[in-house]
Image: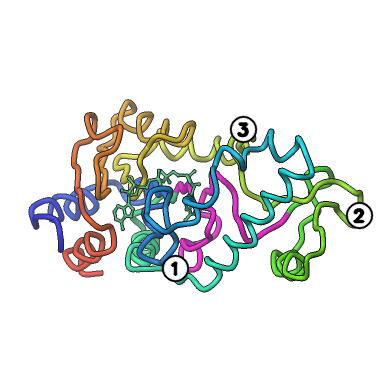
Amino acid sequence: MCAEGGKLDKLARWLMEGSPGRAVVFSGAGISTESGIPDFRSPGGLWERFDPAELSFPRFMASAQSRQRYWDFYRENWRLSREAEPNAAHFAVSSLEHSGRLATVITQNIDGLHQKGGSSPEKVLELHGNMWKVRCLSCARLYPWEEVFLRLKEGLGVEYCHSCGGFLKPATISFGQSLSEDVLEQARHHTLKSDLFICMGSSLVVYPAASFPEMAKHAGARLVIINRESTSLDDIADLIIHDQIGPVMSGVMDILGK
Ligand code: NAD
């Protein structure tokens, strides 16, 4: 299955015509479903067993019971995601970077698959953090996720930092938690300078993340949306491809000659 060739040709042409290093990729959970990590909607995913509202930051801070629920979620999330490998879309995005076409990848994903697929870590702006690090909320000491995972498997508590006694939490941004100002600032900078802004696999409903495509469009960039279903910003997009991201991006890379 693939989108009509005309749309892929158009996207490839815009990538070639654009000023070098000014295109931006904005990715969401949908770019990783072809790697086996479910988005919020796919049937059978973790999100059928865990309610995102229960995993919010205020809930995490409120009680030991909520933190236990949170860690139950992460134990499952780590178990299910640790074998995941990048797919054709992640590889296409890293090729675009290495051929000098991309300024940055702004991602809502926490799975680290862009970096695993070859994108330079400094070019990946993780708006919602990274699930493969655990951080103390008080002193910011980092712990390897594997260490915490083993303790969870053994039924031991993981709530407190060995250094300062603060709460440990995966280095992700939960609902109700502030995003990093530094990451937001870099994302704003690249968005405002972009001439081509390509959204891949996001329903574009989670804010402030979804404000970036709007910002890019208002600043004069062409807005492209690749998503298998409609999104909340289809109305303002210059090109909409309702299809699977992996095959679409493989097709675009074939046209570009990799
Ligand atoms: P979302 O679940 O709201 O939307 C994903 C969109 O991708 C859907 O519209 C779906 O139709 C589309 N999609 C799924 N697979 C696709 C494919 N192969 N090809 C084309 N389209 C596809 O995700 P979101 O907009 O990123 O927002 C959800 C929030 O959940 C984010 O904050 C993110 O941090 C978090 N999240 C992250 C991951 C991850 O890191 N992989 C996974 C689940 C949720």
Please name the residue shown 44% across and 68% down the image. Answer: 117
Q: Residue at x 46, y 68 (%)?
A: 118
Element type where label 3 sits in the image? loop
Disc 2 versus disc 3: distance between alpha carbons?
26 Å
Mark 1 — residue? 117
Q: Marks 3/1: CA distance?
A: 30 Å
In this view, the residue in front, 95 or 147, is 147
Q: Is mark 1 within 8 Å of ligand 1?
A: no
User: Which quarter of the rendering shows the N terminus?
Assistant: bottom left
Q: Is residue 4 magenta?
A: no
Query: Picture coordinates of residue 152 (x, y %)?
Result: 74, 64
Q: Which segment did they paint magenta?
A: 106-134
Residue 163: numbered disc: 2
Residues tagged 2 and 3 counted as in contact (Cβ below 8 A): no
In screen coordinates, is 37 left or right of 67?
left
4 is higher (above) or lower (below) than 187 = below
